[in-house]
Amino acid sequence: MLLTICTLSQLPQAIALGDSFVRHSGSSTSIPPVILGLVDDPARLPAGFVSPYPLLPVNELVASVSLAELSSLYTPTEFAAACKPAFITEVFRRYPEIDKLLYADPNICFMGPLSTIWQQLEESTALLTPFITRNPADSLWPDEKFFQNIGLYSSDFLGFRRSDETDRLLAWWTDRVQQRAFINYCEGLCLDQIWLMHVPVFFKHVRIVKNPGWHVALWNLPERSLHQTQNGWQVTGPEGQNQPLLFMNVKGWLYPDQGFFPHQNRLRLSDRPELGSLLDTYRQTLPPSSELSGKSIKPAYGQQPEPVVLRGWRYSAVQSFRSITRFIDQLSLPG
Amino acid sequence: MTLAFTICSINYLAQARTLGDSLRQTNPDYQYIIGLVDKLSVANLPAELVPEYPMLEVDKIGIPDFAAMCDRYDITELNTAVKPFYIDYLYQTYPNASEVIYFDPDIIVFQPLQELNEALATHSLVLTPHTCSPTTDWERPNEQHHLNTGIFNLGFIGLRNDATARQFVNWWKDRLVYECRIDLCEGLFVDQHWANFAPVYFNNVLVDHHLGYNMAYWNLHERFISQNEAGSWMVSGERTSQHLYQTEPLQFFHFSGYNPDKPEEISKYQTRYSFPKQANQASGKPVRFADRPEQQRPDVRPLFDLYRSRLLANQNELYRQYPCVYIKPPKIFRYQRVRRLLKTPFNRLITLLESR
């Protein structure tokens, strides 16, 4: 089974993700195959909207009192992160017949057979994918320090197998992120994600998957090359050659302002023409005309404003002003 | 041959000698070296204070542009930044060393490290997590601190002399030339935080969950000490271990932040635990979290008392009087009001540009 978590405006992508999951899961899929966790108000869905997959609104798993409290503390991104482990726990509870559950961000799209993922879960209780698997060895951004700030494992894709160990993991993670899903690097916090740093140490049978065909995304494309073959896309990277592309994440790639790396400068899409056709393939999977497409609906939860992504002269100006204030702070003056 | 080494300045030589003595007793086949971030020519130690272990001064190991590194870093940063440079130097100088093991000077090794030796026969790196299980409260240090400063404690690292470990050491050296600072907002905490990358970049890394490795104030919540009939220190995952088979021999204990002048304090860096005090029990409700009855740790007290007596026997009082030649006066940034005033227009512009 697959679970994703989305707001109303992310629903078209979430549905495309669900479709890609169903397309590649073969006959082994559960009923229902996909659950769409909704961190938004279902009452605001357009009239007549019918979801192809069951919706699980957040107010069915978090009591309204704490919902209001969390909403007032967090930005929409932080709010969704604070609820993620609770969603995963709830899906395991509601569907006692399912044994293996994937979580994927709505920006993910499955591109190849999922049998390898299920196989890995036979031997593990949880699967994690690192953002990068090699030292970038350049002076570009994001640098390694920034990956330390946000956590080295992406929380956009996770795999779980039902077990006592998984229950312990989810109980611990739920407890940590409800109150500590803020993005505050100075305090060692970054959403639900940085907490994953403890997971391979605290819990047994957690596998870190470095296969280059898993979780191809903006942040790891510089270390991976892609080529199209008769059997679909193949990926070569530091940890493997010609691996089938299993799934990719278009966060920050489809919409550059999304995600952690709006100012990344390591990957130049113009140097990688093959990526254009891959992204086109992705766009074609989005629902052609949806009542929700192209609409930017303010999410119902997460009252704090998201940080603004600056571009162009505004960005350069703020960067310069920051370096001036840093200079003023660090200038040694005689006593 | 296995090399074991530590790094310290002269003021910590009592600790380094105590570690060396414990290694000589428990692991006599290890060759032990003290990396010295100090100058013997300046200190001019009297004969009775010269340790019987070989010392390797930091200015003799060929760190490129070492003077600039000394300028950049404070004493903590410098002492940690040189670690991979020492490892690399030992690899080059002792090609027959099949393993190099680093211990912080404030560690005592209690057992032959048989399991570590076996682990290093098959793994390139062995790391120990600060804690193998969740912390039980938000006292210091807790899981959030470890997120900021590193999952693994770099008071210990075991390295095989193989291509993977050398790659790791070279990468680590490169990072520490400029980025061995303490700057949590920027994702930096000396050499330690960088080790988070080890299991991500490299495949042959063992994260060792043995409860007897690197026991210290940061993992007391999951480890309890007892002494068996033969007098060996044993570690258990439970406070009251009725099943002796669940205990493991204590391999090495890390007395981080302990001051023999304050024998009542477990560590200056922690607020979770205390040693039982007569006064507490008499004076009603405890004020500090650490003084609550359930937070008292009589089980580890004998280890600390043992450590204290060994430090005193190893002339701690004399060594600590030697100032490190690399220590600099702390940087003081004067005229804070003027600085704030100068920054105001820029900060206002930033706020304006960042508003919607």
Image: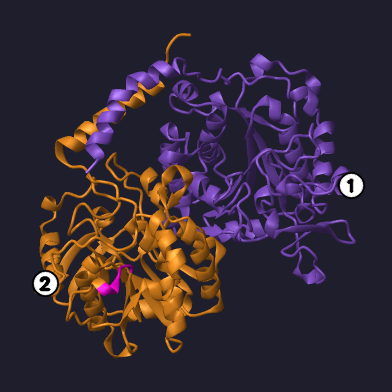
Residue bearing mark 2: A284
Q: Position of residue B290 (x, y in %)?
A: 73, 48
Please say if the residues under marks 2 and 1 sit with CB atoms less than 8 Å apart: no
Which three-letter amino acid code belongs to the residue tagged 2?
Gln
Q: Label 1 sits on what residue type?
A: Ala
Q: How many marks?
A: 2
The percent coordinates of residue B80 (x first, y second) are 55, 35
The residue where tag 1 is placed is B282
Q: Is residue A208 visible?
A: no
Q: Please provide the residue range marked out in magenta.
A: A39-43
Chain letter of the residue carrying label 2:
A
B176 relative to A128, above or below = above
Classed neighbour count for the residue bearing mark 2: other residues with Cα under 10 Å, few (<14), some (14–19), many (≥20): few
Q: Which chain is purple?
A: B
Element on which disc 2 rests: helix
Looking at the rendered structure, whether the residues under marks 2 and 1 are on a common chain is answered as no
Q: Residue, x 45% and y 38% (percent of image)?
A: B173
Q: Is A149 left, or right, of A306 in this rendering?
A: right
Residue B52 x/y as whole percent: 76, 31
Q: Tell me which chain the residue with mark 1 is part of.
A: B
Q: Nearer the viewer, residue B54 or A236?
A: A236
Using the image as rendered, state which of residue B42 and residue B325 is in the foreground: B325
Which residue shows up at 29% across the image and 91% down it?
Answer: A27
Q: Quadrant of residue B102?
A: top right
Chain A tint in image: orange
Q: Nearer the viewer, residue B103 or B356?
A: B356
Residues at marks 2 and 1, CA–CA distance in whole angstroms: 75 Å
Q: Is residue A41 magenta?
A: yes
